[in-house]
Image: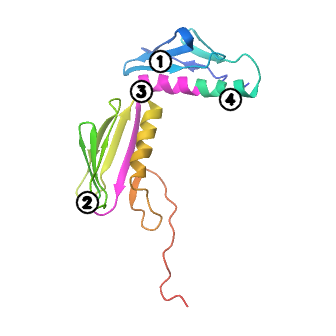
């Protein structure tokens, strides 16, 4: 059995899960509602506030989907009950970000500003805690996959470089730094 797949998913207070026709799982909670289509071979059942995912055979295809769908359902339950938050900081002289509704406006040292439109499911704030500190972008959503994809897109606008560490990075991310050229190398 899959170690991940055989673990039950506990439903917190206020969260309900239903399995509809064509094996579509719907999770409703205090923060919203998420849907996920599950492969027809995988069975999802709800018993006494826990969700169990099972597979029909031990084929490699079924084994791989067993853990996958259990993890996706668990992420949906956590998303609608607690939500997900990702923080990113802009490190570099003159790097700025401004949140205008669903549009993030970046100034990252290019000859032009970059405007990034966010999906409606994501809420973003941009804050500079104190003068001279790095700007921090905070993304909040109930969909883990979507928020991760948007965070990766934002990071790709100016990846951190290994010499000075300038760029967009996740808060708390450790970068591998390189030494520069040696002065007076003979």
Q: Residue at x 66, y 24 (%)?
A: 66
Q: Mark 4, mark 3: which one is toward the viewer? A: 4
Residue 139 location, quadrant = top left
Q: Secondary structure at mark 3?
A: loop
Disc 1: CA contacts within 10 A as few (<14), some (14-19) or many (>=20): some
Mark closer to the chain start, 1 or 3: 1
User: Which residue, as the protein is rendered here, is positioned at the far bottom?
Assistant: 186
Disc 4: CA contacts within 10 A as few (<14), some (14-19) or many (>=20): some
- Could you tell whether 35 is left or right of 131 in the image? right
Mark closer to the chain start, 4 or 2: 4
Gap between marks 4 and 1 measured at Cα: 26 Å
Gap between marks 4 and 3 measured at Cα: 27 Å
Disc 3: CA contacts within 10 A as few (<14), some (14-19) or many (>=20): some
Q: Position of residue 181 (x, y in %)?
A: 49, 79
Q: Which residue is mark 2?
A: 132
Q: Which mark is residue 29?
A: none
Q: Which residue is mark 3?
A: 82
Q: Which residue is mark 4?
A: 64
Question: Is 154 rendered above or below residue 95?
Answer: above
Question: Is 106 rendered above or below residue 57?
Answer: below
Q: Mark 4, mark 1: which one is toward the viewer? A: 4
Q: Position of residue 60 (x, y in %)?
A: 74, 28
Gap between marks 3 and 2 measured at Cα: 32 Å
Q: Secondary structure at mark 2?
A: loop
* Range shown magenta: 71-94
Q: Which residue is mark 1?
A: 12
Magenta stretch: includes residue 44: no
Asked whether the beta carbons under mark 4 and mark 3 sit within 8 Å of each other, the answer is no
Gap between marks 4 and 2 measured at Cα: 48 Å
Q: Quadrant of the C terminus?
A: bottom right
Q: Residue at x 43, y 58 (%)?
A: 160
């Amino acid at each position: 059995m899959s170690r991940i797949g055989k673990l039950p998913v506990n439903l917190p207070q206020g969260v309900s899960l239903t399995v509809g026709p064509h094996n579509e799982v719907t999770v409703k909670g205090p923060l919203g509602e998420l849907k996920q289509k599950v492969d027809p071979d995988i069975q999802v059942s709800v018993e006494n506030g826990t969700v169990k995912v099972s597979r029909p055979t031990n084929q490699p295809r079924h084994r791989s989907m067993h853990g996958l769908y259990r993890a996706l359902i668990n992420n949906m339950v956590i998303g609608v009950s607690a939500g997900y938050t990702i923080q990113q900081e802009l490190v570099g002289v003159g790097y700025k970000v401004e949140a205008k509704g669903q549009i993030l406006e970046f100034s990252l040292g290019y000859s032009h500003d970059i405007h990034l439109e966010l999906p409606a499911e994501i809420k973003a704030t941009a804050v500079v805690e104190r003068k001279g500190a790095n700007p921090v972008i905070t993304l909040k959503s109930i969909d883990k996959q979507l928020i991760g994809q948007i965070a990766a897109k934002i990071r790709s606008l100016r990846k951190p470089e290994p010499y000075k560490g300038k760029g967009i990075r996740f808060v708390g991310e450790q970068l591998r730094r390189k030494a520069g050229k040696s002065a007076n190398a003979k």
